[in-house]
């Protein structure tokens, strides 16, 4: 039998115990052991950011972490970014409103990244928003509407009205 | 209110933003998993495969080599698009037989309990190779000194010529002429999700259910049935959510699309394969690499008299997708222009590299680069404004439809259906402020800055046939289920098609459910490529909705004792026109659906209304009349005689760093004519994404092989796709010239954004630097060296920058 190690962690608020091989990636443990398939794997070398999850609130690449290293940690995936009532969370809602996704494969990594960013930056400018997402690859959208969605998500998070974030007026270079 | 033309938010989003999407690797969680031993050599003979050390790996289920394959599965994969000039087409085996022709070619298939175990097994399999000399790059290939395939002389897969008039004579006789050598390097589609396949064999039913991340599920189905020698009705193929395609997933069947179902049947267990990033780089497909030699003749006003183009296309090791890419270059190169006499000859060459098949734009970015570089060269020669030279050569709006006299990629005449190129140019000049730019450039130079402006024009053949279809059924609860056979990779087809059906059928958008790419639902389709979905499936679904509407009106007319011509469908109810919403004068579509299916058995309450004793019936009339069918449903097809042609023009303002030669895009403007627009939000998204790939292709992305055929940058660390910080904000203006060829007037928008990127950015850099650019992409270090090589004085020397 392949040797496994018991890991206890909190995933989207629920305590979970896993018996994993020491080499098992967190991305695989989430996707295939816990069946939380919202976390996507685009490159498996930490460049694209599709697998980004929040570890104790900090965005991390789950394809570069071994699940065994997460004992005692609290992990939030895209599934955990919903609103408390089960509806779309503010970042998810903003991505929808601003057409900030096409195929949606990279989207979970953006949603988690932006969720963490907005927790510390309540009112980003377009330039700030662009910088905030500059570690994640998207092959479909050209990022313009994602920049708008970051700003729209900031509005939604604070209960501000729509308007400030217009997809057509993203950051000018 | 109609939804056609509205910015309707996408129905796809709710599942995708919450992690509830279903991509290929999300499926088959309990399936066995496959991994492959792939060739580490570009060109070699397989001497021996030794699996001894691998046999005791825990979790191993099976190891397969070519020797294990039987029947048609052991034969080469199909040549999908034959052409009479493709005299030496070659395709790979699903698993290499005797010889490998590029790094990454699959040699051994391993099936194990999970991917970790499968890769452990792969690591322990030893393949001995006898190395053969590799052929890498067009220059090496066209020399013909070394051969990729022993039986392909000169490495030439095909030579193809098209001409209108005597172009060389026209060039020779022209008052002025130029010759240019122009190159575009290799790139790749690089969707964020790679390929993947899950296959389930049902031994009781003797049938296969295959999920694959493809751009054509119907054709994969046919191919699997053929390869596995199964009746086609024993195979169904479903396309789940697909994480981007951009062309690479139109190729089929991939070796894995044959081998995974083959192994699932053989093992009697579900098998899955998910491509990893390195596999995608070395074993899927690339595009773009071409060298072009151009001779052009023109008059003193810059009007073209003759154009003669020879180009060499690097098709990689195999040609399963035929000559589509170079055919598109050779025809779409003409853009919006009348070029006089035209001759184009291309040679498609084998190399020991990954094969070449369409990547978004599919040969058009190369053709556009060639034509637009020619236009800029003529403008420079004649000291004319670059827009003026273009305007003097434009096909005029009143010349539409315009026959270019060539045969297009669909085998049909290259006839532009619509467009108003002078109007597009006028809008672009306004949008970017073309006439004000020289003053801006002067001001910038005075500040020691280098800025430049460039533009490029394209025409894109879209909506190619042969056909697509749609099926629409109204359920008895009023839900409208729509299906079309082609697939989706993020273009918002479920939303766009629902908009069309909502308008055509008069039902609420929320009641419509659209399925794409599922052969269980729709078996006849071609695929998603060539910006064709809105044209082909959009039109098919619209025509089908009209059939359903007609049927609904006929049935409702009997129920309401009215004339069908006096009825309308509003908000899911059939009613007498102008009669308002009284219950007597209207019937909902769900009830019409019940009546549309005369029943014997009342399996639910609604069904009771359609049973034989529910209402008096005319004893002399058959419940289902001649030529009628039960159910409120219809199937329809759309098949055009030829392609639509979208067009557009891009203008770019760049700034180059005087010291580092870094290129920064200050503005990116697009004027775009894709005919009528179904959902502007979706169309603009397509343009944004296309432009981002155009920027990537111009400044960052290139596939780099060394002379041994090793791919040097098979990772996202080294193949530089743009992040948000590299992509400009795109400013867009739409010009709408509806297509006369289809019922919606649409022309397709999927690929256009990428096409003029390299051409426009090269022109802008050239304008900023005063250095002629002849090959793209260009990196800062290349621009830096071009500055040195050409000994061009920095333009702002007066300001003291040295």
Image (tube, coloured by chain):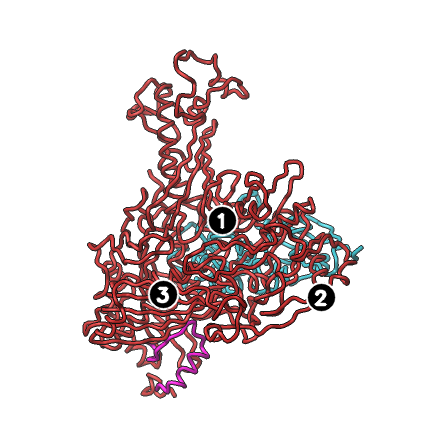
Chain colours: A cyan, B red
Q: Which residue is mark 2?
A: B126
Q: Are marks 2 and 1 in contact (CB under 8 Å)?
A: no
Residue range (magenta): B768-793
Left or right, B589 with respect to B32, comes to left
* Up-down relation of residue B600 to residue B227 (above or below): above
Q: Position of residue B165 (x, y in %)?
A: 25, 64
**Secondary structure beneath disc 1?**
loop
Which of these two is toward me, B84 or B518?
B84
**Secondary structure beneath disc 3?**
helix
Pinpoint the chain carrying mark 3: B
| Residue at image point 34% right, 68% down | B652
Pinpoint the chain carrying mark 1: B
Label at residue B367: 3
**Secondary structure beneath disc 2?**
strand
Left or right, B54 with respect to A118, comes to right
Name which of mark 2 and mark 1 comes first in the sequence: 2
The answer as to whether the residues below labels 2 and 3 share one chain is: yes
Q: Nearer the viewer, mark 2 or mark 1?
A: 2
Q: Which residue is mark 1?
A: B216
Q: Quadrant of residue B339?
A: bottom left
Which of the image's four quarters has the C terminus of chain B?
bottom left
Q: Position of residue B263 (x, y in %)?
A: 66, 49
Q: Position of residue A162 (x, y in %)?
A: 41, 50
Which of these two is toward me, B519 or B342?
B342
The answer as to whether the residues below labels 2 and 1 share one chain is: yes
Q: Residues within 10 Å of mark 1 (few under 14, many from 20)?
A: many
Which of the image's four quarters has the N terminus of chain B?
top left
Name which of mark 1 and mark 3 comes first in the sequence: 1
| Residue at image point 52% right, 74% down | B146
Left or right, B547 with respect to A117, comes to left
């Amino acid at each position: 039998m392949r040797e496994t190690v018991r890991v206890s962690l909190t995933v989207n608020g629920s305590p979970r115990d896993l018996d994993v091989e020491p080499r098992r990636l967190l991305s695989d443990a989430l996707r295939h052991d816990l069946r939380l398939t919202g976390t996507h794997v685009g490159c498996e070398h930490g460049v694209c950011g599709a697998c980004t999850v929040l570890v104790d609130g900090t965005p991390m690449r789950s394809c570069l972490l071994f699940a065994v290293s997460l004992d005692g940690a609290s992990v939030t995936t895209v599934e955990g970014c919903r609103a408390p009532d089960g509806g779309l969370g503010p970042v998810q809602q903003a991505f929808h409103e601003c057409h900030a996704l096409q195929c949606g494969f990279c989207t979970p990594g953006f949603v988690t990244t932006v969720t963490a960013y907005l927790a510390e930056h309540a009112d980003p400018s377009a330039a700030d928003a662009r910088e905030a997402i500059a570690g994640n690859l998207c092959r479909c959208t050209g990022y313009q509407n994602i920049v708008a969605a970051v700003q729209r998500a900031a509005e939604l998070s604070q209960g501000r009205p729509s308007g400030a974030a217009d997809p057509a007026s993203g950051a000018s270079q | 209110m109609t939804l056609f033309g509205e910015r309707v938010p996408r129905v796809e989003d709710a599942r995708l933003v919450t992690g509830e999407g279903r991509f290929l690797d999300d499926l088959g969680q309990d399936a066995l998993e496959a991994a492959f031993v792939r060739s580490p050599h570009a060109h070699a003979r397989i001497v021996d495969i030794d699996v001894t050390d691998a046999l005791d790996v825990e979790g191993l289920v099976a190891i397969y080599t070519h020797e294990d394959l039987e029947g048609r599965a052991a034969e080469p994969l199909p040549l999908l698009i034959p052409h009479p000039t493709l005299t030496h087409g070659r395709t790979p085996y699903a698993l290499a037989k005797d010889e490998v022709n590029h790094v990454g070619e699959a040699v051994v298939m391993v099936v194990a309990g999970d991917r970790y175990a499968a890769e452990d097994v792969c690591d322990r399999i030893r393949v001995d190779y006898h190395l053969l000399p590799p052929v890498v790059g067009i220059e090496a290939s066209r020399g013909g000194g070394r051969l990729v395939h022993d039986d392909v002389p000169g490495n030439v897969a095909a030579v193809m010529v098209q001409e209108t008039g005597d172009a060389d004579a026209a060039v020779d006789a022209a008052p002025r002429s130029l010759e240019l050598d122009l190159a575009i390097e290799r790139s790749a589609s690089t969707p964020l999700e790679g390929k993947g396949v899950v296959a389930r064999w049902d031994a009781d039913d003797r049938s296969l259910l295959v999920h694959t991340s493809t751009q054509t599920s119907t054709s994969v189905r046919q191919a699997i049935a053929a390869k596995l020698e199964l009746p086609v009705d024993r195979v169904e193929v479903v396309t789940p959510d697909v994480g981007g395609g951009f062309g690479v997933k139109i190729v089929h069947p991939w070796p894995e699309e044959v081998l995974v179902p083959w192994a699932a049947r053989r093992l009697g267990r579900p098998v899955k394969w998910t491509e990893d990033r390195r596999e995608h780089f070395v074993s899927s497909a690339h595009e773009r690499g071409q060298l072009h030699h151009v001779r052009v003749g023109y008059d003193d006003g810059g009007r073209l008299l003759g154009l003669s183009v020879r180009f060499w296309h690097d098709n990689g090791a195999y040609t399963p997708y035929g000559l589509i890419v170079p055919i598109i270059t050779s025809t779409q190169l003409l853009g919006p222009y009348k070029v006089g006499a035209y001759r184009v000859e291309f040679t498609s060459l084998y190399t020991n590299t990954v094969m070449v098949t369409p990547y978004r734009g599919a040969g058009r970015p190369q053709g556009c680069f060639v034509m637009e570089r020619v236009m800029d060269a003529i403008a420079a020669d004649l000291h004319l404004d670059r827009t003026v030279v273009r305007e003097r050569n434009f096909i005029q709006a009143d010349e539409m439809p315009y026959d270019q006299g060539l045969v297009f990629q669909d085998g049909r005449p290259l006839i532009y259906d619509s467009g108003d190129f002078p109007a597009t140019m006028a809008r672009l000049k306004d949008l970017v402020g073309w006439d004000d730019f020289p003053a801006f450039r002067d001001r910038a130079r005075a500040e020691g800055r280098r800025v430049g402006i460039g533009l490029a024009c394209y025409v894109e053949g879209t909506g190619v046939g042969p056909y697509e279809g749609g099926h629409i059924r109204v359920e008895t609860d009023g839900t409208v289920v729509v299906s079309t056979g082609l697939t989706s990779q993020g273009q918002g087809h479920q939303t766009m098609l629902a908009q069309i059906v909502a308008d055509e059928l008069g039902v609420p958008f929320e009641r419509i459910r659209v399925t794409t790419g599922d052969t269980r639902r729709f078996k006849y389709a071609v695929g998603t490529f060539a910006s064709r979905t809105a044209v082909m499936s959009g039109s098919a679904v619209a025509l089908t909705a009209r059939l359903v509407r007609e049927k609904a009106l006929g049935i409702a007319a009997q129920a309401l004792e009215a004339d069908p011509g006096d009825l309308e469908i509003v908000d899911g109810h059939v009613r007498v026109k102008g009669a308002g919403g009284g219950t007597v004068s209207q019937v909902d579509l769900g009830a019409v659906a019940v009546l549309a299916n005369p029943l014997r058995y009342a399996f639910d309450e609604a069904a009771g209304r359609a049973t034989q004793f529910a209402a008096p019936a005319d004893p002399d009339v058959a419940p289902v009349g001649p030529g009628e069918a039960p159910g409120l449903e219809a199937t329809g097809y759309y098949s055009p005689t030829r392609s639509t042609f979208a067009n557009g023009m891009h203008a770019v303002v760049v700034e180059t760093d005087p010291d580092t030669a870094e290129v920064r895009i200050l503005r990116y403007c697009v004027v775009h004519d894709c005919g009528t627009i179904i959902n502007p939000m979706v169309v603009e998204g397509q343009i944004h994404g296309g432009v981002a790939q155009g920027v990537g292709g111009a400044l960052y992305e290139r596939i780099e092989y060394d002379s041994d055929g090793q791919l040097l940058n098979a990772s996202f660390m080294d193949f530089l796709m743009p992040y948000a910080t590299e992509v400009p904000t795109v400013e867009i203006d739409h010009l709408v010239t509806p297509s006369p060829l289809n019922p919606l007037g649409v022309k397709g928008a999927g690929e256009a954004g990428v096409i003029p990127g390299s051409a426009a950015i090269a022109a802008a850099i050239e304008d900023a630097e005063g250095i002629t650019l002849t090959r793209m992409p260009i990196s800062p270090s290349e621009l830096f060296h071009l500055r040195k090589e050409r000994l061009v004085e920095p333009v702002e020397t007066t300001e003291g920058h040295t």
